[in-house]
Image (cartoon, rainbow, N blue to C red):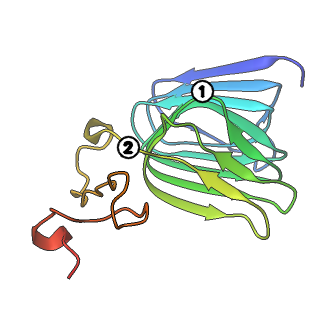
Amino acid sequence: GSGSVTLSAGGTVTSTTGATDVLAAGLSLTAGGTSALRTAVASITAALTSGDLDITEADGVVLGSVTARDIKIRSAGVISQTAPIVGRLLDVGAGSAGDIQLDTAANRIDTLTATNPGRAVRVSSPRPAPPDLYPSRNPTCPVVRPRPGSRSRGRPTRRGVSGPCRRR
């Protein structure tokens, strides 16, 4: 499609046909709950106030700002981004035709799962997702970034961390 589609709902937005739900140049989704769609769009932005986002894209896709508890993106082509992704879990998978490049410095992702057989995967998330995105989460162990010139050779360490987070 050549135009953009805006979907806004106080609750969930889900597919009922099993076929492509949105065929457009762009999709802007705002929802109050878990949303799952099959798309054929060039770009997606999404803001879910609660619940998870599950997108199955027919081609490659450029992600704009995406905020949801858990985010799952499956694409037959390249997956890239132009704005921050915020979520507890980011699960991405691209077909053999494209790379995954989600390296915007403002990303806030706690856990990443990426599947891209034989292709590049580049993801950046310097800070975890905000706790108010999912208040019931378990606490995570902090990762301390090394100082320039330290002996860690640029690898994250747990130096100065005590309790169950400290590696022995």
**Above or below: residue 120 compared with residue 31:** below
User: In the drawing, does residue 119 fall left or right of residue 74?
Assistant: right
Specify the label residue 127 is tagged with. 2
| 1 vs 2, front mark | 2
Determine the image quadrant of residue 50: top left
Q: Secondary structure at mark 1?
A: strand
Residue in view at x 51 percent, y 37 percent: 105
Residue 7, above or below 112: above
Spot occupied by residue 39 in the image (x, y as percentages of width and height): 76, 40
Give the residue at the far left of this rendering: 163
Q: Is residue 128 left or right of residue 163?
A: right
Residue reaching furthest front? 149
* 37, 27: nearer the viewer: 27
Marking on residue 29: 1
Mark 1 and mark 2: Cα distance apart in space? 24 Å
Q: Is residue 60 left or right of residue 137?
A: right
